[in-house]
Image (cartoon, grey):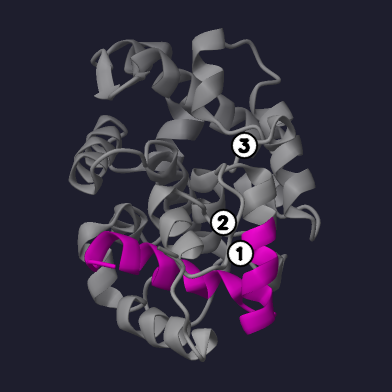
């Protein structure tokens, strides 16, 4: 049996699903609620980056672990990153989120400080050019340019190795898209939403394949590129709005 579903107007179907899921109700059960608890730009981007970093597994667990990280930072992430002491880091509990432990968290904070002090901050590094692939590749190099443990490296995707970089692309969606629907922030203005790539995970990948939008079996950067090109045919100015449709269907609907 052919599992691909045939819709006479796939764009209309995806637009309908995007409208259904891209609204403030989405925030309640999604890790994006973490940066939504802050108002300062740097707090939003740091809390969002950390929440996106651990966004694998049950969303309720991701949210609980993200809140734990914020509490450990005094719910003032930018100030903590820039002014923490060694004792502050040494007081972290071992368990943070699944395989992301206190040593990983300490390094992420240390590297974020280096990025804000010496590289102009997350926005400057991740939106340096219109080429997201190159930005992500450079970001990985900068992030690990200071002393680090090898065990920490898998917690930040490396697109140069073919990673789909789901969590980084999701974080970029949060920061760059500005559709005034109340979910994504749109606080980064250096690049257009047209430059973004789909945050490809098991849910969005499964639905994309069922709809005939993606034939590649692996969830890697090549698949991200192929699916994003397809979505640009539906909306070349804002293709990643369809992340809400694909992910929303995959998580919430019996499809």
Q: Position of residue 237 (x, y in %)?
A: 67, 81
Label annotation for residue 172: 2
Judging depth in this view, the residue of 38 and 159 nearest the camera is: 159
Residue at 56% in and 69% down: 240
Label annotation for residue 188: 1
- Choose top left, top right, bottom left or bottom right for residue 23: bottom left
Regarding mark 2 in the picture, which secondary structure is present there? Answer: helix
Q: Position of residue 254 (x, y in %)?
A: 22, 66
Q: CA distance from mark 3 to mark 1?
A: 24 Å
Left or right, residue 191 beside residue 57: right
Residue at 69% in and 47% down: 222
**Mark 3 burial class by Cα count in 10 Å: few <14, some 14-19, many 20+:** some
Magenta segment boundaries in residue numbering: 226-255
Residue pointed to by mark 3: 163
| Magenta highlight: main SS | helix
Quadrant in which the C terminus is drawn: bottom left
Looking at the image, residue 103 lies above or below residue 5: above
Q: Nearer the viewer, mark 1 or mark 2?
A: 2
Question: Magenta stretch containing residue 230, yes or no?
Answer: yes
Q: Position of residue 51 (x, y in %)?
A: 37, 43
Residue at 22% in and 34% down: 68
């Amino acid at each position: 049996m052919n599992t691909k579903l045939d819709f006479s107007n796939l764009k209309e179907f995806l637009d309908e699903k995007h409208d259904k899921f891209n609204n403030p109700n989405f925030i309640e059960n999604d890790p994006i609620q973490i940066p939504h608890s802050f108002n300062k730009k740097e707090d939003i981007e740091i809390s969002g980056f950390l929440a996106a970093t651990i966004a694998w597994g049950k969303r309720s667990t991701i949210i609980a672990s993200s809140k734990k990280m914020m509490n450990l930072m005094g719910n003032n992430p930018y100030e903590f990153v820039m002014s923490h002491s060694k004792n502050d880091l040494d007081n972290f509990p071992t368990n943070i989120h699944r395989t992301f432990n206190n040593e990983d968290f300490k390094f992420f904070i240390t590297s974020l400080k280096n990025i804000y002090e010496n590289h102009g901050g997350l926005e400057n590094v991740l939106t340096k050019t219109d080429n997201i692939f190159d930005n992500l590749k450079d970001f990985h190099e900068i992030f690990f340019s200071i002393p680090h443990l090898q065990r920490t490296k898998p917690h930040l995707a490396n697109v140069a190795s073919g990673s789909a970089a789901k969590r980084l692309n999701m974080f970029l969606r949060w920061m760059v898209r500005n559709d005034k629907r109340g979910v994504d922030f749109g606080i980064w203005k250096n690049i257009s939403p047209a430059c973004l790539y789909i945050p490809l995970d098991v849910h969005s990948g499964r639905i994309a394949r069922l709809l005939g939008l993606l034939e590649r079996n692996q969830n890697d950067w090549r698949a991200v590129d192929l699916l994003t090109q397809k979505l640009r045919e539906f909306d070349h100015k804002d293709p990643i709005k369809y992340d809400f449709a694909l992910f929303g269907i995959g998580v919430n609907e019996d499809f």
